[in-house]
Amino acid sequence: MRKLFTPLVVLTAAMFAYAPIAIANAPYESTMLLVQKIFYFHLATWMALAVAVSVCAVGSAMYLFKGNEGADRVAFAAAELAVVYCTFGLISGSLWGRKAWGVWWQWDAKLTMAFMLEMIFLGYLIVRKYGGPGAEKLSAAMGIFGAATAPFIYKSADWWRTIHPQTSVMKTLGKNAPPMWNVVWFCGTAFVLLFLILLALRVGLEERRAELDRLYLEAEA
Amino acid sequence: MKLLRCAAFAMMALMLSAQGGWASQPQPPPATDGFVAANDLPPTEQLPAGPFVVGAYSCFLVLMVGYAWSIARRLNTVEKEMRTLEQRQSRGSSTR
């Protein structure tokens, strides 16, 4: 994994350097025109968020049911990144919505559920920091339930009446506008790679903290 | 009596004209159950898209740089604490 880290950083940096060019060259959407360009980073952040909450759920389950402390550290790091990505997803969506819908925010099903997901993972971090003994298990349970809301958020625009575009947009995009489709996946891949890099760094920090705790225990013994 | 009839007639005419006046006031638009898209507004009232696109991408850059800086800062704090602890331990073992 350590050998892969540097090439991964170089690849991701190159992808992010090229992303603005790819986005600028992508065709304009016929009704929204320029503001639709937010879509490429907006959707990519939700893709990375889906990976983050999945990693958090798997890590949390491994910690709860098998007592794997390494998995707990990964879950903690993924939860923090989920908050970062979700924050950007909500901000970019709000900026896009202000231009496309004329409002900064709308309490419809999809947006409200995405906001609740952010609150759940913020709760995870607060429990983790101030929960005292046993907080790891409590936060792990929160991580699993937080991740369980993600599929509902994804399908909410199809199931309930919302102003957010439905998931069929993605299906038709592949058929109707392949150049836009390619840029979506390019940005999505870049965001997921960036997530992996930040996850590795954040897990490294948790490992050093665990090492510090071990040294303190040794010093006290 | 004639005066009374004239007054009643004038009052009735006033009431009728007032009712007509109320009826001619503009009615509020019917309640809608959703927002009207901004693109339906005349071009003079539409917002330019550039600042929103630039804002979104700048926000991402700031958020990611800020987060990477926060990880580096926390890592430095842990490393510093570890060095202090190791120094304290080595000092303690040399005095024994």
Image (tube, coloured by chain):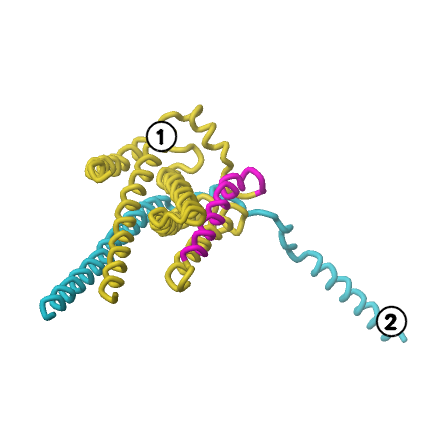
Chain colours: A yellow, B cyan
Q: Position of residue A204 (x, y in %)?
A: 26, 49
Mark 1 closeness class: few <14, some 14–19, many ≥20 residues within 10 Å = some
Image quadrant assignment for residue A134: bottom left
**Residue carrying label 2:** B5
Q: Position of residue B23 (x, y in %)?
A: 71, 57
Chain letter of disc 1 in the image: A
Chain letter of disc 2 in the image: B
Which residue shows up at 84% across the image and 70% down it?
B8
Mark 2 closeness class: few <14, some 14–19, many ≥20 residues within 10 Å = few
In the image, residue A112 above or below residue A26: below
Amino acid type at circle 1 is Pro
A62 or B49: which is nearer to us?
A: A62
Image quadrant in which the N terminus of chain A is located? top left
Query: Do callouts 1 and 2 mark residues in contact (Cβ within 8 Å)?
Result: no
Q: Residue furthest top?
A: A175
Q: Which mark is residue A27?
A: 1
Q: Residue furthest front?
A: B96
The residue stretch that appears in magenta = A136-161
Identify the element where label 2 is drawn. helix
